[in-house]
Amino acid sequence: MRGVAVLGSTGSIGVSTLDVLAQHPDRYRVVALTANTGVDKLLEQCLEFRPDYVAMADEQAAKVLSTRLQKLGLDIEVGAGVSGLEAAAAHPQAGSVMAAIVGAAGLAPTLAAVRKGKRILLANKEALVVAGALFMHEVQEHGAEVLPIDSEHNAVFQCMPNNFRDGLGRVGVERILLTASGGPFRTRHSEELETVTPEQACAHPNWDMGRKISVDSATMMNKGLEVIEARWLFDALPDQIQVVVHPQSVIHSMVEYADGSVLAQLGNPDMRTPIAHALAWPERHSSGVSALNLFDIARLDFEAPDTDRFPCLRLAFEAVNAGGIAPAVLNAANEVAVERFLAGEIRFTAIPRIIEQTLAEVVVGDENTLEGLMLADQQARQVAEQQIAVRV
Ligand code: NDP
């Protein structure tokens, strides 16, 4: 029986993870769950899965949860704040840790799991975007194992040779082809993008996801963050990563080899497939996802991305090529801009402008330490907020 901690259990990935775990009660036991403020949902999950430990980032919410658990007679320890999340991640009974907190807030708890040498099922791509070098260094140092949950990276992982960590060139890998759906605005004209609403941006054609990643998909920043994530997960040069728009989201990504072979992983767009893959790896078990019907799909299309209409993808490539603190700054400015767009305070097209300006202004921070990266993150948030204040 393998103990699993689910960080961000009340979110889209968290709920899908619990769905897969519930299908295999003979293999897994849920030992820890975490959320930010969603007391009702976390309480429901406590009733169903009876973990040993739960934590909430919001201290007030943790107090409310604790009182309600006591009233129900449930003996579950409750933690609060970042230290509470870290304790859930480092739980001694957890062999695997699903890292599914959204944003840079997931970095510290995920690192706590890394430092305990756990198997990390990594959905929280922002952790690698902010601190890729440091994160991968800690993984090596502590003998942790990282299995990608992002459907594209999970696909790449499945198409890679087992010894890919010896170096892509040495094992005959030429390129990683990351597929992108193109999001809900793939066919919209630039002028139309000026007036799109948060609801339209969150209505993804193929995937049902949390609101932040849905907006990231609409701006194509999601693909940009994924390029940076792939750079670190597979030790690839940015030039070895190509983005391919594939509107059907059936091919989740591909690996091109020196002999001209291209290996692809296909499946229905449902995150329970990569989640089940990473939970069971190197074995396989069911995920609850229906079988792919190629006759229903009938055709697969491919296009080059348009970085004029979707400049966030260009900005992400620029940031990963610049290195240093640039990806952390890109991520922080994006988090601020997306939040303000979702709140209806800025236009969709302001998102890349705010990020570009923030990248130009923030230069302080040491990428070799967590403190230095957090300083860059904080400064970028301030600069992005200042620009929004001027615009609104
Ligand atoms: P959601 O917004 O649906 O869920 C986020 C989770 O994180 C919730 O449990 C939320 O708690 C918690 N949370 C939010 N803010 C904080 C915080 N400051 N501190 C601690 N916990 C917090 O996100 P998704 O599930 O969509 O995405 C999670 C991660 O997975 C992201 O990094 C995303 O990029 C990645 N991902 C998601 C995919 C998807 O299909 N959804 C696909 C591939 C990757 P609460 O409910 O209390 O707010």
Image (cartoon, rainbow, N blue to C red):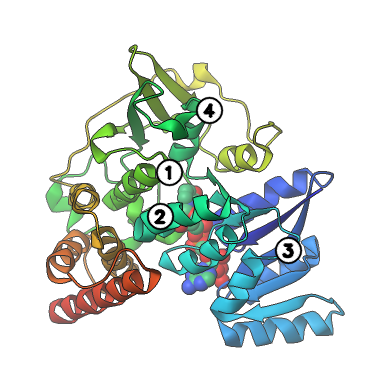
Circle on res. 162: 4
For the residues labelled 4 and 2, the Cα–Cα distance comes to 22 Å
Task: Give coordinates of residue 218: x percent, y percent.
Answer: 31, 50
SS at mark 3 in the image: loop
Q: Are marks 1 and 2 in contact (CB under 8 Å)?
A: yes
Q: Mark 1 or mark 4: name the one nearer the start of the chain.
A: 4
Callout 4: CB less than 8 Å from ligand 1: no
Which labelled disc corresponds to residue 92? 3
Q: Could you tell me which secondary element the residue under label 2 belongs to?
A: helix
Residue situated in front as seen by the camera: 344 or 249: 249
Q: Look at label 1 and name its amino acid.
A: Leu
Q: Marks 1/2: CA distance?
A: 8 Å
Question: For residue 128, which numbered disc appears in the image?
Answer: 2
Q: Amino acid at mark 2?
A: Leu
Q: Earlier in the sequence, mark 3 or mark 1?
A: 3
Q: Earlier in the sequence, mark 1 or mark 2?
A: 2
Q: Which residue is mark 1?
A: 233
Gap between marks 1 and 4, in whole Å?
14 Å
* Residue at x 35%, y 38% (from the top left corner): 181
